[in-house]
Amino acid sequence: MEQERVNPAPNVSGLVRSFTKAIKFRGSGINQDDRINKVRMKLSSEDEEKARIKASMVALLAKLFASISSIKAAYAQLQVFQSPYDSEGIQSVDEILIDELIRLSEMKQIFLKKQIDPSPQVTILLAEIQEQQGLIKTYDIMRRQLETQIKVKDSDINFLKEKLEESEKLNRSLEKRLKSGGVALSVSDDLHFSGLNPNHFVTVLRQTVKSVRSFVKLMICEMRSSGWDLSAAAKSFEPDVVYSRSNHVCFAFEAFVCRMMFDGFQFSNFSHPSQHKTSKKPHQFFKQFIETKSMKPNELLSKFPKFGKFCHEKYLVLVHPKMELSLFGDLNQRNIVNTGGYPDTRFFAEFIEMAKRVWMLHRLAFAFEPEAMIFQMRNRCRFSDVYMESVAEDAFLLEDGSLIVDPRVGFTVVPGFKIGKTVIHCQVYPCPG
């Protein structure tokens, strides 16, 4: 009979050791959590310190910019007090500058010592307020300075307007005296035939060109008021010319008027050679020039029938019926001219004044011996400084602003003249070759 198996007695000492180990293990876990918490607390403390330092630096920079803004405002105010000189104002600004410099020195020490601002948000807010105040003060000073400058400019403008009005009155007075014969075209009244020289011709030519341009200006003004396309009209005069500036089309009108008015200038009777030629001598032409230069256009018409015939022919060829009808709504002026009369209009008055100048220039041209010879340049011929000058300096420029390399003559605006060996340049409008 088998013996009954008896369970051995439990090992008490082993159980005690296992329990002890378990207790030690739990104890070691508790110590580990404490260390983790301590590490976390340490890291959190360092982050907070860094954030405080950063906030302090931001606040310091804000104070720095605010101080600079105050210094700028004070400097602007100092300039105001310099002129006119204000000693009290300068002293007050000086105190502000000293205070701001002291603040800058204090900020430098705070930065070097790395001092922490206890309330950086408040400092930043106050600094922003100070900076805005400085900017407002600076802009206010600038505004007052600009207002003062505007007043000075307005005063200058009013003064110049008064001077301009005085000049215009003087010019109108001189022009009236010129037209009435009180002043003789800048050519001396005691001019004698023996003392005649090309300079006198140049003087009268300039006055003639001025009169032509005055008539052209009025004609263009009337055309613009009547709705004309000036570019298209200029193209009908000079079809193959490209203008460097849009306002240069006026030279095409001037060229057309000069071409019509100076047609036949080379003949002594100012007419075509098929007609009767005059047998006048140079001194007789000179005498007519002296007589006509002091006459009003109406007196000239009544005393010199040839001048009246000249005006009649030139007006009819210069002012086309369609143009007259478009400008004035009727052909009354043309009808009056055709019947031998002279319209009492501003347009015809400008025309008759221009005709008088051209007629006088012709009389003076044949007072020279040999007579002054008229010439003009062919279109597309090479530009030459010897015989030509440009009516506009910017006509030598292309649209992109570069100079024309090989300038050519687009068309002759004002003819040139030759008196003996003296050449009076013709005025041309240049264009690219």
Image (tube, helix red, strand yellow):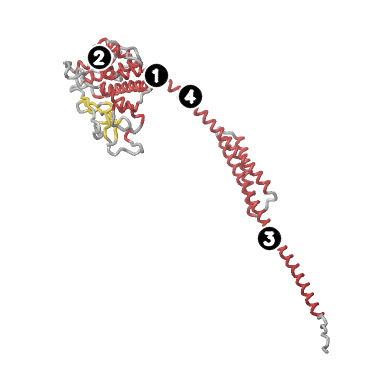
Q: Residue at x 31, y 29 (%)?
A: 391
In this view, 164 is above or below 101: above
Residue at the image position 80 percent from the left and 77 percent from the top = 15
Looking at the figure, which quarter contains the N terminus?
Answer: bottom right
| Residue ID for mark 1 | 170
User: x, y (%) of residue 284?
Assistant: 20, 15
Label 2 CA crowd tier, 10 Å (few <14, some 14–19, many 20+): some
What's the CA distance linking mark 4 and mark 3? 76 Å
The quadrant in which residue 262 appears is top left
Q: If you read the primary sequence from the N terminus, does the residue marked by circle 4 or circle 3 appear first?
A: 3
Closer to the N terminus: mark 1 or mark 2? Answer: 1
The residue mark sitting in front, 4 or 3, is 3
Q: Is residue 305 left or right of residue 232?
A: left
Q: Nearer the viewer, mark 3 or mark 1?
A: 3
Q: Secondary structure at mark 1?
A: helix
Q: Please tell me which of labels 4 and 1 falls first in the chain.
A: 4
Crowding near pointer 4: few (<14 within 10 Å), some, many (20+)? few
Disc 3 target residue: 43
Looking at the rendered structure, the kind of residue marked 2 is: Phe
Q: Which disc number belongs to residue 158?
A: 4
Query: How far separated are the C-alphas under marks 3 and 2?
Result: 113 Å
Q: Which residue is drawn at the image coordinates 35% and 26% (left, top)?
A: 230
Amino acid type for the residue under numbered disc 4: Asn
- According to the picture, the residue beneath numbered tag 2 turns out to be 307
Q: Amino acid at mark 1?
A: Leu
Pair 1/2: label in front: 2
